[in-house]
Image (spheres, rainbow, N blue to C red):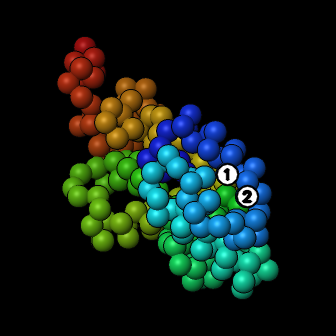
Amino acid sequence: MLQQTQVDRVLPKYREWLDKYPSLKALAAAHPDEVDSTWRPLGYNARPKRLHSIAKEAVNTHGGKLPSDEQTLRSFKGIGAYTAGAVQSFAFGRRAPILDTNVARVLFRVFIGYGYRKDTVTQKRLWTLSATLLPRKNVYDFNQALMDFGALVCTARKPRCLICPMSPICEAYPFNLDHEQVVQHRS
Ligand code: SF4
């Protein structure tokens, strides 16, 4: 729900969704039209359909629960590398990397700096970085912190480089400063 949508818009919908569908079984049993209308107006309308189909598959083949290993998670239609990592890390506390837009941006800027971020080779490199950096413990906190850091400090349009604790090791610093920040940086 949070992908490309602000938290304050998501919160009421998130609560409504969980009230209506407190379990995968409840979601699987719901009528597709009702699931669609509950999701609106969040956008990205393929997502409720995918969630519905994942819930049905979980009920039909996994006793109403999501599996915790990557291979089985990725066998579900609609679960890719990011979602599998997020489910493993956030739902099961497993040591699994994630690479959403925020995390990819942070890792790209800090460790690579410049170039095109979305090509296959770079994406592979970012996944490797995300996995290599994982701590042995508290992976949930680490992944959440990385996502929040991208959402609040290393933002897409106006990264807050001047207050950023990563600036001494960041490959994109100070080139990511906008004009106003460059003036402050030099003064
Ligand atoms: S210095 Fe700027 S570009 Fe680098 S990680 Fe910090 S906010 Fe992002």
Q: Nearer the viewer, residue 82 or 128?
A: 82
The C terminus is located in which quarter? top left
Residue at the image position 54 percent from the left and 37 percent from the top? 9
Residue at the image position 50 percent from the left and 47 percent from the top? 42
Q: Quadrant of residue 51?
A: bottom right
Which label number is shown at residue 17? Answer: 1
Q: Nearer the viewer, residue 124 or 43?
A: 43
Residue at the image position 33 percent from the left and 32 percent from the top? 158
Q: Nearer the viewer, residue 158 or 7?
A: 7
Image coordinates for residue 56, horizontal then vertical, percent:
67, 76
Kindly identify which residue carries mark 2.
21
Q: Is residue 157 above or below residue 90?
A: above
Instruction: Determine whether the residue tagged by mark 2 lies in a helix, strand or loop.
Output: loop
C-alpha separation, residue under disc 1 versus residue under disc 2: 6 Å
Image coordinates for residue 128, horizontal then vertical, percent:
45, 68
Residue at the image position 35 percent from the left and 53 percent from the top? 108
Check disc 1: other Cα within 10 Å, few if <14, some if 14-19, many if 20+.
some
Mark 1 sits near ligand 1, with its Cβ under 8 Å away: no
Residue type at mark 1 is Trp
Image coordinates for residue 144, horizontal then vertical, percent:
60, 48
Q: Are marks 1 and 2 in contact (CB under 8 Å)?
A: yes
Query: Is residue 41 visible to us here?
Result: yes
Mark 2 sits near ligand 1, with its Cβ under 8 Å away: no
Instruction: Determine whether the residue tagged by mark 1 lies in a helix, strand or loop.
Output: helix
